[in-house]
Image (spheres, helix red, strand yellow):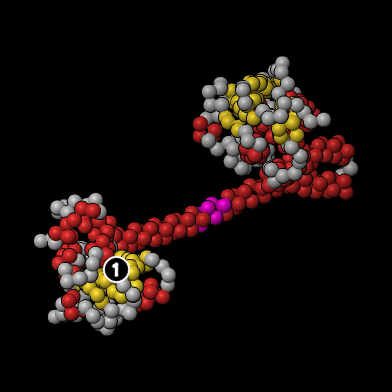
Amino acid sequence: MLHLMTIKKIKSLGIDPNKEQFSKDELVSIVQAGIQMDYDTEHNKIIVPFFDTFPGPLYWVNSDLIYLLTNRLVPLAEGSSHKDLIGKIVGETEHDGFLSIALRKFFASNNQVFAWSAKILSNNESRWYQFTACRYNHGEKDTAIVYGFDITAQRDLLLQIEESDRRARNALNRLEKSNAMLSYSRKMEALAEMSDAIAHEINNPLAIINGRFTFMYRKGINDQENFQQKCSQYAKSILNAVRRISVITDSLKIFSNASGSGDIEVINILELINKSVTKFKKTYNSWTKIDVRLKSIKSKILVECKPSQIENAFLRILENSFYAIKDLNESWIEIDFIEQELNFNIKITDSGIRFSDDIADKIFQPFFTTKEVGEGSGLGLNVAKGIIDDHGGEIVFDRDSKNTSFIVTLPKAKRSHIDE
C-alpha cells in the first residue's frame, strides 16, 4: 500500500495514483520526485514501493559509485537480494560491470542525461535493456538515477528487419548482376548479329565489284569484241554496288553517333522536309520515278533541333518507302502535317500495303529488313528513331492506315522566332 506522502506527491505531478498501470514517462517522473522528497526515516515507506513496482532494473547511485537504493529487478548473483547491494560499490559483482563502465563515463562528463543499451542476465535469461542515467544532486554529492526498460522484443524485431533488409539487398545485388550479365549477353548477341549483317550486306556488293572487274580484265586481254559495251554495262553495276556500300557506311556512322555533333537551331520544319525531299529525288528518281506529294501548310512551324540530323531522319524514312514501292505500278509518297498545341506531327505515307503486326513490332530494330537481299541496310528506320527520340520526339507506325504510314511527332520550339 502506498504511503500517504507518496500519493500526494503523485497527485502533484498530475498523475492518478489509483491507476492500475503507469506509463514509462509517468514511472520515471514518480521515481525522480520520490527521491527528491526528504531522505529521512520515512525513506523506505515513500520510495521503495515505487522502486519495487518499476517494470525494469532501477538504481540510485552516488558519484563514488556507491549503491544508495535498488529494486528487485536488478541482476543479482544466485541467492542474493537487491537489498544486499545497498552501500556496496558498483562493479564488485559479475552482474553489474556494464553499469560501472557507463556510470564512470557519466560522472566524468557534464551531461545531465546519459543513455546506453546493454545485454544482462536476468532470471537465467539474457535480455537487452535500454538504460538512462539522470543526474540528481543530493546533499554534497552528485547522484544518478538509472532506470532500464526491456527492449529485447524491439531489438529482436529490429534484427529481423535488418536481416530481411540484408537478404533483400543481397537478392537485389544478385538480380542486378544477373541483369547486367543478361544485358551484356544480349548486347554481344546483338553485336554478333549486327556484325554478321554488316559483313553480309557489304560482301554482296563487293562480290559484284570483284566479279565485274575480273570479267572486264579477262575480256580486255582475251576478247576485244564488244568489250566497250560490256564495260558500260558492268560499270553501272559496279556503281550501284559502290552506292550500296556507301549507304551502309553512312547509316553506320549515323547509327553510332545519332546524337553527335551539330548546333541546335530554331528552324522551320518545312524547310528541313523540303531539303530531305530534294535530296531523295536527286538520289533515287534516276532509278525509278516516285511521285512525292507534299501537302501545304499555312503557318510556319518552328522546331528546336540539329537540322542536319532531322533532315537525315526524314531522308531515311523516305528511303525506306522507296525500296518498298519502287517496283509497284503506283509509286507515291504523301507527306501531311498535323499541328497541335505543343507538338507538330508529320505523317509520311507511301503506296505500299501496311505491314503485318508481327513485322510492325520489329521494324525499328537495327538490321531488321523486309527488303530483298542486296537492297538497303536495315538501319534506316532505327537511325531515324534514334535521332527523333534524342530530340524529344516520337516516331510510330500507323497500324490503322491502309497503306504503310509513319507518324513523326516533334515538340514545337519554345522560342517564338528564329535567332538572327
Q: Secondary structure at mark 1?
A: strand
Please, which residue is most extreme toward the bottom here? 92
Q: Is residue 186 magenta?
A: yes
**Residue 22, x across and y down, in percent:** 20, 55
Q: Is residue 397 above or below residue 144?
A: above
Q: Is residue 225 left or right of residue 70?
A: right
**Residue 331, x across and y down, in percent:** 68, 22
The quarter of the rendered structure image containing the N terminus is: bottom left
Judging depth in this view, the residue of 372 and 227 nearest the camera is 372
Q: Is residue 419 left or right of residue 104?
A: right
The main secondary structure of the magenta stretch is helix
Q: Is residue 175 above or below residue 229?
A: below
Range of residues picked out in magenta: 181-187
Which amino acid does the dot numbered 1 rest on? Ile
Name the residue: 25% across, 71% down: 59
For label 1, the residue is 145
The quarter of the rendered structure image containing the C terminus is: top right
Name the residue: 59% across, 23% down: 403
Name the residue: 80% across, 39% down: 239
